[in-house]
Image (cartoon, helix red, strand yellow):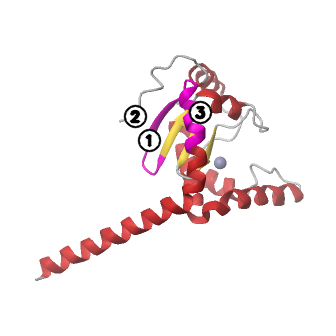
Amino acid sequence: MPQRADATHNKACFRGIFFWRLCSLLWTAPNSLVGLILGGVGLLSGGGVGRCPGALEFWGGLPAIVLKILPLRGGAHAITFGHVIIYRSRTLREAIRKHELIHVRQYERLGPLFIPAYLAASLVALLRGKDPYRDNVFEREAFAASEAPYMPFPEELLAEKNHEGLASSPSPTHKPLS
Ligand SMILES: [Zn+2]
């Protein structure tokens, strides 16, 4: 009997986890769709795709060029939409994945409200005379939890990512991660 009770309990736990995972995917779906479209553009323009626990990852291609010219000092390393992370280059993934996964968790909490809340947090920081990026509460949480480096990135990594992220050769960046 105890074994049967354990099996029933495990089944209920699994269903609960599956239910909340499904809710999380649906809640972030509008944002993830934006990420998938941008990632698709990246793939069509020489970028790559892979995955990590909790997110789909894209790098390189046209989105990388856009990230480079974003109005941040040195451009942006990456941008997250729901469960999709778009990096400037494949090289950057290991260095800043933890940071971006915090943003994924923030999307899971706020869903479609995340982007308006993020922009409002930047505005609040700006009105207080602070940096709209570094002093944004969502970025502060991500930096505190991930220990990712602030801008500008180390020179050697910048050189590497510029070489890899903006290269037109389709391989090896097209290879999905195992
Ligand atoms: Zn961030």
Looking at the rendering, the stretch of residues picked out in magenta corresponds to 36-55
Q: Secondary structure at mark 1?
A: strand
Q: Quadrant of residue 121?
A: bottom right
- Is there CB contact under 8 Å for labels 1 and 3? no
Q: Secondary structure at mark 2?
A: loop
**Mark 3 is on which residue type?**
Val
Up the image or down, 154 lies above or below 30; here it is above
Rendering coords of residue 44 (x, y %): 55, 27
Camera-near label (3 vs 2) is: 3
Camera-near label (1 vs 3) is: 3
Rendering coords of residue 157 (x, y %): 60, 27
Give the class, few, some or many, for how many residues have Cα within 10 Å of label 2's Cα (few <14, many ≥20): few
Cα gap from disc 2 to disc 1, whole angstroms: 6 Å
Task: State the mark number for residue 41.
Answer: 3
Rendering coords of residue 145 (x, y %): 57, 54
Q: Give the residue displayed 40% in from the left and 68% down from the top.
A: 19
Give the class, few, some or many, for how many residues have Cα within 10 Å of label 3's Cα (few <14, many ≥20): some
* Quadrant where the C terminus is found in the figure: top left
Cα gap from disc 1 to disc 3, whole angstroms: 17 Å
**Mark 2 is on which residue type?**
Leu
Q: Is residue 178 visible?
A: yes
Label 1 near ligand 1 (CB < 8 Å): no
Up the image or down, 147 lies above or below 75; here it is below
Q: Is residue 147 visible?
A: no
Q: Give the residue displayed 55% in from the left and 35% down from the top.
A: 40
Which residue carries the number 1 mark? 51
Q: Secondary structure at mark 3?
A: helix
Question: Does 42 appear in magenta?
Answer: yes
Which residue carries the number 2 mark? 177
* Quadrant where the N terminus is found in the figure: bottom left
**Mark 1 is on which residue type?**
Arg
